Image (cartoon, rainbow, N blue to C red):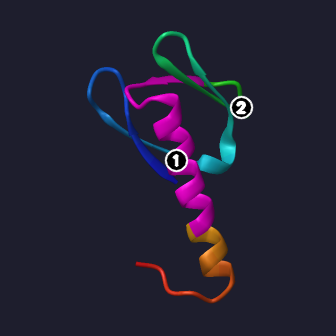
Amino acid sequence: MIKTMRLNGKELVINAELIQFVERTPDTMITLTSREKVMVKDSVDEIISKVIDYQRLIRRKAMGGKIK
């Protein structure tokens, strides 16, 4: 799961495994595999970074590493 923020300032947590597309339109639009679209304040690069961090955390956990 990754934390982001809707345009109205409310925090949103998204299952990173369900992200299909991230677009700049000019706001950042996340399209989920369910085809639901969510506009967020984070930039495309910030969303990508959060997804990469999430994937690293999952891999570390799968290899028996500690999670902070």
Q: Amino acid at mark 2?
A: Ser
Q: Is residue 60 magenta?
A: no
Disc marking residue 49: 1
Q: Which residues are magenta?
A: 37-56
Mark 1 lies on a secondary structure that is helix
Instruction: For marks 1 and 2, give the CA distance.
Output: 22 Å
Q: Is residue 54 magenta?
A: yes
Q: Residue at x 71, y 31 (%)?
A: 34
* Relative image position of residue 18 (x, y in whole percent): 67, 43
Q: Residue at x 60, y 48 (%)?
A: 16
Q: Residue at x 61, y 78 (%)?
A: 60
Identify the residue position indicated by label 2 in the image.
34
Q: Is residue 1 left or right of residue 31?
A: left
The earlier-in-sequence mark between 1 and 2 is 2
Q: Amino acid at mark 1?
A: Ser
Q: Is residue 2 left or right of residue 61?
A: left
- Label 1: how many Cα within 10 Å (few below 14, some 14–19, many 20+): few
* Relative image position of residue 58 (x, y in whole percent): 62, 69
Disc marking residue 1: none
Magenta span: helix, strand or loop, mainly?
helix
**Residues at circles 1 and 2 in contact by the CB criterion of under 8 Å:** no
Foreground of the two, 42 or 33: 42
Q: Residue lying furthest front in this view?
A: 45
